[in-house]
Image (spheres, rainbow, N blue to C red):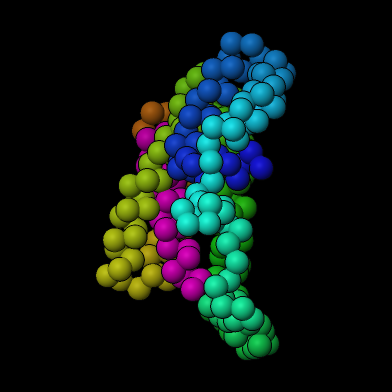
Amino acid sequence: PALALVAERFPATLELAVTAALLAWLVGSYGWRTALVIAAIGVWVLMPLLTMIIRWPTNRETEQPAYLEENPAHGAKPAADVAVSGVLDRPTKVLRSRLFWFLAIGLTLNFIGINGVVVHVVPYLTRSGLTIEGAALTATFVPLLSIPGRLFYGWIGDRLPKGKCLAVSFLAQTVGLVALQYSPSPWALGVFVLAFGTGYGGMIALMPAAVG
């Protein structure tokens, strides 16, 4: 529920950037155990208060939350259900498609790499000689630079084949990971946050279109 509430009301990139900076400050000031306790207490205290302040979108006529609205036509399937049922009618055809397997394997490996960076980048940078604040600042720039990455790759994806643009975004993330091996060199960190951040944003922008 906490994640759903925050994701509904705040941009994901802003959420990641603010959270990383705040947690880095708490860890640097109080240690990771105390920081974890403070973060947990903050979730337990703040989220119930936010639920009383922030409201879900409602239909002005019925005053019902948007996600509780019933289908206007009784017995009629929503368009999304019709589309999904159409896909499920031919699962074997989808599984025999090379495009499906290219996308499934490529996106799976990409998300494994992204999650690995998110979890380990700050400890890796601190062990490389960077301060905890510097490592957190570097990690903060990744989601921030994903914003121009989404804009650029979304724009270029309207003019070039989306599959090739998605492959370029994967390549950009790979370049960023290679540069990360040379941290804490300033040029290496710059290449990492620029290439990996924009490539990550490009993947997020292009993935729905490529899958669809």
User: 126 or 11, which lies in front?
Assistant: 11
Q: Position of residue 79 (x, y in %)?
A: 53, 77
Q: Is residue 163 visible?
A: yes
40 left or right of 82 in image = right
State left or right for residue 185 relative to residue 120.
Answer: left
Q: Is residue 16 visible?
A: no
Above or below — where is 198 with respect to 119? below
Task: State the extent of the magenta-drawn residues as a range.
Answer: 188-212
- Tell me which corner region of the image, top left, top right, bottom left or bottom right, holds residue 90: bottom right
**Residue at point 64%, 11% (across, down):** 30
Q: Is residue 102 above or below residue 89?
A: above
Query: In the image, is residue 95 above or below residue 205?
Result: below
- The spot of residue 205 in percent (x, y) is 42, 58
| Frontmost residue, 8 versus 40 | 8
Looking at the picture, how far across and down is residue 6, in whole percent? 55, 39
Magenta segment includes 209: yes
Secondary structure, magenta segment, majority class: helix
Residue at the farthest front position: 61
**Left or right side of 147 for 23:** right
Which residue appears at 50% of the width and 19% of the height? Answer: 133
For the point 64% across and 38% down, which residue is it? Answer: 2
Q: Position of residue 202 (x, y in %)?
A: 40, 55
Q: Residue at x 60, y 45 (%)?
A: 4
Position of the N terminus, as image quadrant, is top right
In this rendering, the count of numbered labels is: 0
Asked whether 48 falls inside the magenta stretch, the response is no
